[in-house]
Image (cartoon, coloured by chain):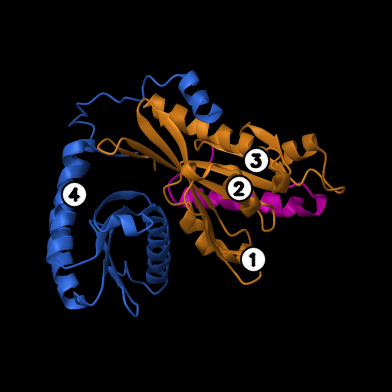
Chain colours: A blue, B orange
Amino acid sequence: MQEVFEAEFRRLEDALKRLERDANAKVVFLIDKNGQNIAAAGETENFDATSLASLTAGNVAATDGLAKLIGEREFSVLFHEGQRDHIHISIVARRAILLVIFDERSSLGLVRLRVKRASVELKKVFDEMDARNEPEVGVTEPSPFSEITDEDIDALFSE
Amino acid sequence: MTFINYAAKEINCKIVYYGPGLGGKTTNLQYIYNKTAPERKGKMISLATEADRTLFFDFLPLDLGSIRGFTTRFHLYTVPGQVFYDASRKLILKGVDGVIFVADSQRERMEANVESIRNLESNLHDHGFDLKEVPAALQFNKRDLPNSMPVDEMYRMLNYKREPTFEAVAPQGVGVFDTLKAVAKQILVELRKR
């Protein structure tokens, strides 16, 4: 199970906002490798974030498979060039995917440069999340799910 | 892997429909898509060949409502059933929280069913999962066909660990939601345990 707490989420979001601004991007998404959205910044309302996340994760998984077939560990950057909009995909901390959508107001060089810087920041947050998940450090917040009842679960399906 | 976002108050889980080719995995998803209110579902994505066979996966995000203040989202995926797509099939299992095995009830597809369960077991194992531990449900689909095998015989051949088992006719929706519920419940119960 992966958990993101409020403070970590804000830090991830801040890093994405900075990236979106500095790279002149339209939108930036942080997605976990299983296809779940973690955080985003920019014109998110113009994009179907859920579909983007699942297709991006599928794309990265397929590319990872290709890498392994030829003996590479991973292809850390993917770039798709469109007529108007372009997509830059990179792996952060070996576990998350950074998706940047940009147009002619930016350039591949600028995006690459800013993505590198943002990745360092994002990795720091992920590393701290991992450290927190170590059993000896302990989770301070009690899980809100330990008290889920059968009625709660049934209620989900009765609506 | 269940993903809990405490800031956005969301729980995200991944359920994978597995089974032999032409068994009705995509049909299960299509039925769920058609019967779910627009505000509770996202876009259904099908990466299929020109002949409508699943090439990589189908994807359907479902919002089941909230539990203890957390929005509960299920991401439903199907795998391509055809034997030679094994590399793609394995990728889809990454981070899975629950599995629904859709078996084809036709007698001549029994060997394909058995082979597919073995394949599921081995692909899960490669991701570090044990089918015995993963929330699962079994669906005997195409019960309306004249050449379908008796249920008890299928159960003996295909039931892996006494997982909940359902008879289904997916295009008409028979058994479709029951199967989904059975797995979703097991996933949420797992959440409670930790």
Label 3 and label 2 in one chain: yes
Q: Name the residue under label 1.
A: B52
Question: Does residue B66 appear to the left or right of B111 in the view shown?
Answer: left
Q: Name the residue under label 4.
A: A12
Is residue B111 a member of the stretch shown in magenta?
yes
Q: Are marks 2 and 4 in contact (CB under 8 Å)?
A: no
Whichever of labels 3 and 2 marks the residue nearer the N terminus, that label is: 2
Task: Choose mark 2 or mark 4, whichever is in front.
Answer: 2
Alpha carbons under labels 1 and 3: distance apart: 21 Å
Give the amino acid at mark 4.
Leu
Tell me the chain of label 2.
Answer: B
Q: Name the residue under label 2.
A: B34
For label 4, the SS is helix
Tell me the chain of label 1.
Answer: B
Disc 2 packing (10 Å; few <14; some 14–19; many ≥20): few
Alpha carbons under labels 3 and 2: distance apart: 12 Å
Q: Are marks 3 and 2 in contact (CB under 8 Å)?
A: no
Q: Are marks 3 and 4 in contact (CB under 8 Å)?
A: no
Q: Mark 3 points at which residue?
A: B176
Label 1 and label 3 in one chain: yes
Give the amino acid at mark 2.
Asn
- On the image, which quarter does residue A74 sit in? bottom left
Which region is colored magenta? B104-132
Whichever of labels 2 and 1 marks the residue nearer the N terminus, that label is: 2
Q: Looking at the image, which is closer to me, A135 or A60?
A: A60
Whichever of labels 1 and 3 marks the residue nearer the N terminus, that label is: 1
Q: Do the residues labelled 1 and 3 touch (CB within 8 Å)?
A: no
For label 3, the SS is helix
